[in-house]
Amino acid sequence: MGKSPFYIFSHKKRKNLYGKKYVKTKRRKRNLNEIGISTSNKDHTVWDLVIPYIQDPQDRAAVSLVCPQWCHVDAITRRHVTIDFCHTAAPDSLFRRFPLLNSLEISGCPPDIFGLIFGDWKSYITPWLREIADREIKALDFQRMIVNDSDLDLLATSVAGKVLEVLKLNRCSGFSTDGLLHIVRSCGRLRTLSIEGSYIIENDGEWLHELALRNTTLENLNFFMSSLVKIRRGDLELIARNCASLVSMKIGDCDVSDLNSFFHASTVLEEFAGSYIYNANEVKFPPRLCRLNLNFMHYAVREVIPVASRFIELDLRTSHIDREGHCLLLKSCPNLKILKTTCAIGDSGLVDLAQFCKRMKKLRIYGYGECREARAVTERGLIALSMGCRELEYLTIYGSNITNDALECVGRYLKNLCDLRLVLIKTPYDSYDIDASLDNGIRLLLMGCPQLRRFDLFLHERWLTDKGFEFIGRYGKNVKWMRFGNLRVSEEGISKFFKHCTRLQKLEMWKCQIDERALGRAVRKLTSLKYLWVEGTKDTSITRDLARMLRKNWMVELIPSKVTSDGLKYELVTHLMAYRSLVG
């Protein structure tokens, strides 16, 4: 928001447009009157009309702290709430605080830890649905939670089910196609149904047939990567004919050439994902299709090129396109804004991307086996990308041979960058001193990207010193989410990092060699921190070190050690998770 006058309502020390600090409530109220903003009851009506237009959750929270009246206005005008971890709030407390919600997003098990924990994580959807059932909730988004068929039956027959328009159960488990059948039979207003990445017990494909017969308002249907295979092409075609507003369809594996009837009926379809393609000559894509994700597209790259000029988003992670195929395709995509691919793109692909795709906003380059087997993305590609695609806002790079000059180039040209994730590995092709630190490059990068809000850094332990870690804290003051991997940080480095990084809300450290005692002391002082994940902590004296970070409403959990054997050697790894909770 820049220098918004609403920043003066925060409980933190901030400045208003006149440069005055507001710390305590009484002092804050007096200064509001001085600058012409009355806090008397007769003028509350004006602010009652203004507050509903404040959408940012942090600004909303700051406004609600000013006085009880504004807190009440925030409560009755809040329409959407996001809960990053379901154990941080109780369902009844949430709806007492915000009684008129019509949209809710909840995440269960934290990401990236599947397979690292034992037993039941207890991320059940049941208590939430019991509280939701009698409310007119129009949008529900559940991620990584345990869902039963009885839960879906309860939702379908409740008041919420009658008005439900958006239902997302992404990466969830525990339910079957019978539960989906309850939903599609009773929730006639559904515009979005997404079960992407969920583990579903597939009894039959009747749920899709019922959806095709009963629903006429569907706009987005997504069962990508859900392992559902009992899908009839006739049902897909019927959905396309009955749902005139269908703009997005993501399905499971099938041959695109068998979907010509579906494509012919989908006159307004803009996004399609999930199938494989061997011969594009037999396929006629819908006229508005501009977002595409196909498997094994390397068989038909040349056949896709005639329609590539309309693409604004491509997902090539499972396309198996090689470096030459990337170059050939990207030269025909002048309107491309979002690209997800693998290290197979190489430096030559990034050079062509920088030359022909000037409107790029998001680029994700994921690392697979080819990153270690061949020289993938290096400083040459990163420098060309930074100089050519200056509108980039999100960037994920998995590469090697990245130097300080390349990092400086990112900071110099990518001024709009708000999400940056760097995974730098060693390969046999590295041509520079592998022991040289990247401290200065990281400093210049962060200095040049003031809008950065998320920063991930995975690299060899010798490539970042305590000084570099201090630079991250000093020049990454606006970053709210940081994730580090394979770092070696001393007690002094941790102290200096936390001293400067006062707005940090989420911190994850994977396989980092750190001083746990110093970490505990620093976490206790950082009041803005809401979530901490540390992988690979020591089992020795763990209780004493963790006690240093305990404070009010702060939960600390230890995920049990895994024992892996390598001959006669055994490795004990404990995972630590700490988070702010309102339920204890």
Image: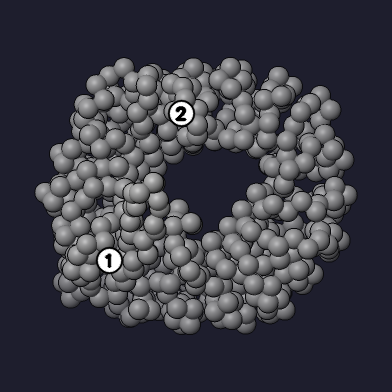
Residue 89 visible to the viewer: yes
> Which residue carries the number 2 mark?
371
Q: Please tell me which residue is depicted at 69% across the width and 52% down the height of the picture.
A: 227
Does residue 21 sit above or below 372 in this rendering? below
Disc on the earlier residue, 1 or 2? 1
- Identity, as a three-letter code, of the amino acid under mark 2: Cys
The image quarter in which residue 437 lies: top left
Q: Position of residue 483 (x, y in %)?
A: 34, 48
The image quarter in which residue 139 lies: bottom right
User: Which is closer to the viewer, label 1 or label 2?
Assistant: 2
Nearer the observer, 572 or 58:
572
Nearer the observer, 167 or 44:
167
Q: Please tell me which residue is depicted at 23% across the width and 73% down the height of the picture.
A: 551
Q: Please tell me which residue is depicted at 85% across the width and 51% down the height of the picture.
A: 232
Q: Position of residue 303 (x, y in %)?
A: 74, 22
Disc on res. 299: none
